[in-house]
Amino acid sequence: MKTNSGRFFEDYHVGQVIEHAVPRTLSGGERALYHALYPARHALYSSDEFAAECGLEVAPLDDLIAFHTVFGKSVPDISLNAVANLGYAEGRWLKPVVAGDTLRSVSEVIGVKQNSNGKSGVVWVRTKGINQFDEEVLEYVRWVMVRKGDLDAPAPEAVIPDLAGNVSVEDLVIPEGLDFLRYNFTLAGEEHRWADYEVGERIDHVDGVTIEDAEHMMATRLWQNTAKVHFDATNRADGKRLIYGGHVISLARALSFNGLANAQMIVALNSGAHANPCFAGDTVRAYSEVLDKAETPAPGVGAIRLRLVAYKDGAPEFALKGEDGKYHPDVLLDLDYWALMPL
Amino acid sequence: MKTNSGRFFEDYHVGQVIEHAVPRTLSGGERALYHALYPARHALYSSDEFAAECGLEVAPLDDLIAFHTVFGKSVPDISLNAVANLGYAEGRWLKPVVAGDTLRSVSEVIGVKQNSNGKSGVVWVRTKGINQFDEEVLEYVRWVMVRKGDLDAPAPEAVIPDLAGNVSVEDLVIPEGLDFLRYNFTLAGEEHRWADYEVGERIDHVDGVTIEDAEHMMATRLWQNTAKVHFDATNRADGKRLIYGGHVISLARALSFNGLANAQMIVALNSGAHANPCFAGDTVRAYSEVLDKAETPAPGVGAIRLRLVAYKDGAPEFALKGEDGKYHPDVLLDLDYWALMPL
Amino acid sequence: MKTNSGRFFEDYHVGQVIEHAVPRTLSGGERALYHALYPARHALYSSDEFAAECGLEVAPLDDLIAFHTVFGKSVPDISLNAVANLGYAEGRWLKPVVAGDTLRSVSEVIGVKQNSNGKSGVVWVRTKGINQFDEEVLEYVRWVMVRKGDLDAPAPEAVIPDLAGNVSVEDLVIPEGLDFLRYNFTLAGEEHRWADYEVGERIDHVDGVTIEDAEHMMATRLWQNTAKVHFDATNRADGKRLIYGGHVISLARALSFNGLANAQMIVALNSGAHANPCFAGDTVRAYSEVLDKAETPAPGVGAIRLRLVAYKDGAPEFALKGEDGKYHPDVLLDLDYWALMPL
């Protein structure tokens, strides 16, 4: 058998290190496509001059380009037979990625637990993105439910990793040289600085975008993510293609510009849930809630912890979960992250 | 309120200068996307070697990339609450934009006039595109009808700017070094030179393109144009997304290659009207009419003034306006511009 | 008549050399779009570092980017009035194309034969792709059936070129410096080396992709291929747009990564047939058959000759031709090529 049928639950064991294939050199082409696929407008990622004023050499590629690239490489090894993408934790951006960088990914299995039905199990992996200088640019934990290939394979000893509920402020990595003292709020698009946001504040990001199949497939392929559910309309009885959860993350993050234009850099992913599936034809909107705020050692740079919720048109205002603790059926994404913002 | 609800008519006053947000560094990625979204083939913009033979250092980005980028930045400040994009005038390309350039936009309000219904008014702005060296690369006037936010706001003193009907030949800016004496007509794709075109001549550009929603949304986002009518299918009762007028401009200009392959550089936008709305599924065709011709001081370089008309499949031949002076319902665009062509 | 109505059968004669218009400088933008449009993952084309380990200066642009670019330029001169694209032969990649290269195309007519119906004929051309240093990067023969414009034009003397059934191993051009001795199979994505493949072996590439109109139109425009059947939904009675055959080639080649991840470089196109038309909505799958194997003088580099078949979802396993010698109606493409693979 020459083709990859993916790993099954029994193929994972704690401590296993998997080097993912197909390193990728990124260029201005990936940025242009990112900006064509999402309404991305954060100035630090759009303008070399703006980035230079903030102490960086050039405008980095959008943080989620790095995330999707690193994530995409892990798909053939981690989630090809996944039933569900269950969660994220301890995600940190460690170094900005710029045009010309080449990224590869490595995952270590840090937990396994067979489900009581004996047909599947949960696998936890810590995935690292590494550049051409062998520097880590990104790391995160994700856990997925994976089918067993051989139902008779014995259940492994359950190992459930002890994961932080959120990345603590001291562990945030501020890009070297970042300095918001000369930050140009006019060019950034909004006047609201870190001090203007209050914990508990919620912001509806106003705009909606109706998604097309051509768009999410182009995006997903761009990250060399090959999960067939995104591309093959014969894969589901209803003929729909399931949209890659990362597409919704990028769309919601880009929409959040309207109200959070100064939440420039994503530095940590505390947790995330793809609450409900998204399909072409859905009109996606987003709101944010300020969860926490902290100062940082970098000049003029504050940190803000945000819940970013994507929802389908028609959901009630600020919809999240029902009284039963389950997500409202129109909620697509519940993401908890830290961003950097001028003080 | 952290989100941008846009300016209303009463928020504009003559002399007001608005610096638009989100400067953008352009790369070969934007060019590749432009050529994927439109059938653009003008050789000067396609080949560094062809451009070098014409006296330029490298192939510039297509003139309409510069236009859309500069225009897109102005949308959140000028046309978010616009009812209609009424016209363009006095547009001039002042310097070619190349990969690596960063563009930002500034607009000055040069006219305001409240409508007699008291509910809206017309705002005229002169918008300039500026590169990372603070050089102007482009300027144009446009006027839009904007809703009043507060119907009780007093009507301002009407100021109607005195705009040129067309840019005069002496005001055309020929890019430094441009020289068409060694122009290669074979590589450019057609043999017809400036001398071969006659004022009054009309050229039907033969080909048609059926537009998809994914395409016009990607194009419009690429210019960071965020007007919701283009993206949100819930915004209109008929569930259609209105196509950005600039998408039709670029499509028509690209189609005009067939018959005007040597009308290489756009140097002025004399006037323009988006005659009727365009939607996905429409098949767009174009014709041109030669309005004027002039010599220029640059070696081998002539100027040609063209009317470019985009229309929907099914329109009568060379359709424009009816006897009532109104545009034929299948006419989408009526654009009047100056281009440079080898003598 | 300023517009190009294309050449008719009687306009071609053996020995005629046609320089095609619109040279094109390629960048990382074209690569990013290629990877967004197709699930392309061959590591040599994805990573500068991987390519450097294989002895190349940087990752070349995917071989089919070069092919489509060179092919696209020939369309206005060769196939605008073509009834059918009949075949390919003697295709060879002569030098990798990298970002920054400018390509142009030249074709020589090497055969003509009027059909017995007197209404059309077959034209054979040898097309060469040439870079900015006047080096040939690619050449291939294709033949097309072209309508006569003037049915009274006399039939030319039939000249049928003597074409090789396949490119012989000695004629394969191995890129200068290519060396697979340090080839990293883990990063490439599969462990199967040249020695692991047997002549006669067939590999079903598992995955399927459902095609959208926006995607194939963007791809086809990117190569400046302007054949109207791909873009204009009013061109056929059924309102469908015929998908450019090259789109199916690229899609099938990209799908073949799953099972042939190490068939890195395409060096020859032995033959090819677009067996049946492809339309948006079709779900495309692919299989390969190993036709031949050969060693090469380059260190660690083997050659493998592959039949790549693209088919529509629903076709029987390994469908190709029926007993009548005709292609199965669900077969889209039958391509025969040589690739380079680590020994």
Image (spheres, coloured by chain):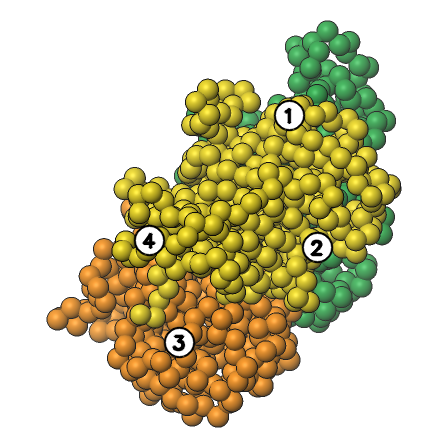
Chain colours: A orange, B yellow, C green
Q: Residue at x 60, y 58 (%)?
A: B129
Q: Residues within 10 Å of mark 4 (few under 14, many from 20)?
A: many
Image depth: mark 4 or mark 2 in front: 4
Whether residue C331 is visible: no
Between discs 4 and 2, the one toward the N terminus: 2
In the picture, which quadrant includes the C terminus of chain A? bottom left
- Residue B310 position within the rendered picture, expressed as x and y whole percent measured from the top left: 53, 32
Q: Which residue is mark 2?
A: B95
The answer for how far apart the CA atoms under marks 3 and 4 are is 25 Å
In the picture, residue A291 is in which quadrant? bottom left
Q: Position of residue C306 (x, y in %)?
A: 64, 47
Q: CA distance from mark 4 to mark 2?
A: 37 Å
Question: Total marks drawn?
Answer: 4
Q: Callout 3, which amino acid?
A: His
Looking at the picture, how far across and down is residue A303, in whole percent? Answer: 41, 84
**Residue A150 point in image, percent of width and height:** 34, 66
Residue behind mark 1:
B203
Mark 1 falls on what kind of element? strand
